[in-house]
Amino acid sequence: MFRIGDGVREWLLAIAAAALVALAFVWLGFGGTSPELASDFEDCVERVQVQGLSADELGGGLAACGARFAGRRKADGGYSYYDFMQDRKFDIAGPNPTADERKAIDREYIGYLEAQRREAISAALAKQQNERLRADIESGRQPAGSPLALTPANVPLPIPRRVAEQRARARQCAEDGLFCTLSKFSTAVKDAFASSSKTKN
């Protein structure tokens, strides 16, 4: 049998150690680009793009990055979360919202829904009012029927002219005593001349 000497044993141990180091180096070199080790969305995208995948695999890898990380890195530091339900961005501390940040976003969403509900009610009321006005305008354009004959129930009787003149004079006499005296005097003079001319005939 072949017996391994002390020198050969050390040599085999050195080769095994070098193989392990090489294996670790290869694993870190290729495994380090694994999207699973990414710290945020942008890091994950970079790692997926380095792998040289086909278009379909690349699309799937990018979708997986989007599913893992909700936040996006901001240029000035920090992260932002886009809520498509509100069409609005929120500042968050890390690559994914914390439980407290999710609660705050949910509270904002409830307020958003309430505002949407109020706008919908206002729009419905405005539409209803416009329809009512349009109906009123249309009914105003309809041809009118035959004119109504309005007859008063209590028709005053005509007053003879002489009585009306006497009433007017009485009103004036109550207001102006001098006018009344002159009016009576002139009437008396007229009557006197009228009666003298009748007697001469």
Image: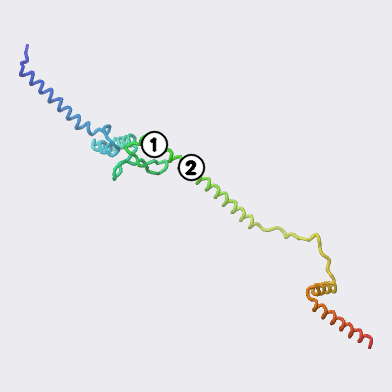
Disc 1 crowd rating (10 Å Cα; few below 14, some 14-19, many 20+) is few
Give the residue type at disc 1: Arg
Residue 153: percent from the left, percent from the top? Answer: 80, 59
Q: Are marks 1 and 2 in contact (CB under 8 Å)?
A: no
Residue 67: percent from the left, percent from the top? Answer: 34, 35
Disc 2 crowd rating (10 Å Cα; few below 14, some 14-19, many 20+) is few
Give the residue type at disc 2: Glu
Query: Which quadrant holds the N terminus?
Result: top left
In front of the other: 157 or 45: 157
Whichever of callouts 1 and 2 sits on the residue coming sooner in the sequence is: 1
Residue extending farthest to the bottom is 200
Against 2, residue 178 (above or below) is below
The colour scheme used to paint the residues is rainbow
Give the residue drawn at x 29%, y 43%: 77
- To which residue does mark 2 refer? 114
Q: Count numbered badges in the picture.
A: 2
